C-alpha cells in the first residue's frame, strides 16, 4: 500500500458529499384589493410571524410592491405559496404569492 491512499480516499469523500438543497424566498406582491389586515393574518398564520414582524412585512408589500415572507426549501416554499393562494381565493382576494430561488 502506498502513502497516497489517504489522499485518494479524501478526494472520494469530497466528491460524494451531498450538496445543500437550494433555498427559495417566498414573496407577497401588492395589489389594490387585498386588505392590509388580511395580509397580516396570512403572515401570522401561514408564515408564523409575530404581529410586529407581520406588520413590518405587510408595510414592505404595501410601500415597495412586495415583501419577503421567509426563506425555505423548495417543498416548504411551494406549500406555503399554495396555502396563501388557497386562503386568498377562499376570501375572494387576488393576493399574489411567488417563490424565487436564491
Image (cartoon, helix red, strand yellow):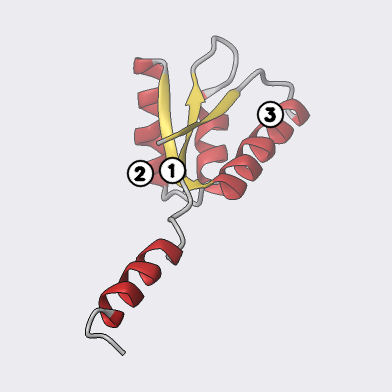
Q: Is 101 drawn above or below residue 9 in the view shown?
A: above
Q: Earlier in the sequence, mark 1 or mark 2?
A: 2
Please give the residue where the numbered disc 3 appears in the rendered image: 88
Name the front one of labels 1 and 3: 1
From the viewer's perspective, is 6 left or right of 80? left
- Verify CB contact (< 8 Å) between mark 3 and mark 2: no
Residue that carries the numbered disc 2 in the rendered image: 52
Q: Residue furthest right?
A: 90
Element marked by disc 3: helix
Residue at image mark 1: 70
Location of the N terminus (image quadrant): bottom left
Q: Residue furthest front?
A: 1
- Taking the view exactly as shown, the residue that stands out farthest to the bottom is 1
Residue 75 position within the rendered picture, expressed as x and y whole percent measured from the top left: 62, 48
Q: How many C-alpha atoms fall within 10 Å of the one at disc 3: few (<14), some, or many (≥20)?
A: some
Q: Looking at the rendering, in which quadrant would you find the C terminus?
A: top left
Residue 8 x %, y %: 32, 73
| Residue located 74% across and 26% down the image | 89
Closer-to-camera residue (12/4):
4
| Direction from residue 8 to residue 32 in the image, left or right | right
Amino acid at each position: 500500500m502506498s502513502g497516497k491512499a489517504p489522499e485518494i480516499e479524501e478526494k472520494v469523500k469530497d466528491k460524494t458529499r451531498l450538496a445543500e438543497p437550494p433555498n427559495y424566498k417566498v414573496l407577497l406582491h401588492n395589489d389594490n384589493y387585498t386588505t392590509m389586515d388580511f395580509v397580516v393574518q396570512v403572515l401570522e398564520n401561514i408564515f408564523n410571524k409575530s404581529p410586529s414582524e407581520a406588520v413590518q412585512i405587510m408595510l414592505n408589500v404595501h410601500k415597495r410592491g412586495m415583501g419577503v415572507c421567509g426563506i425555505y426549501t423548495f417543498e416548504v416554499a411551494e406549500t406555503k405559496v399554495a396555502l396563501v393562494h388557497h386562503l386568498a381565493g377562499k376570501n375572494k382576494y387576488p393576493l399574489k404569492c411567488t417563490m424565487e430561488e436564491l
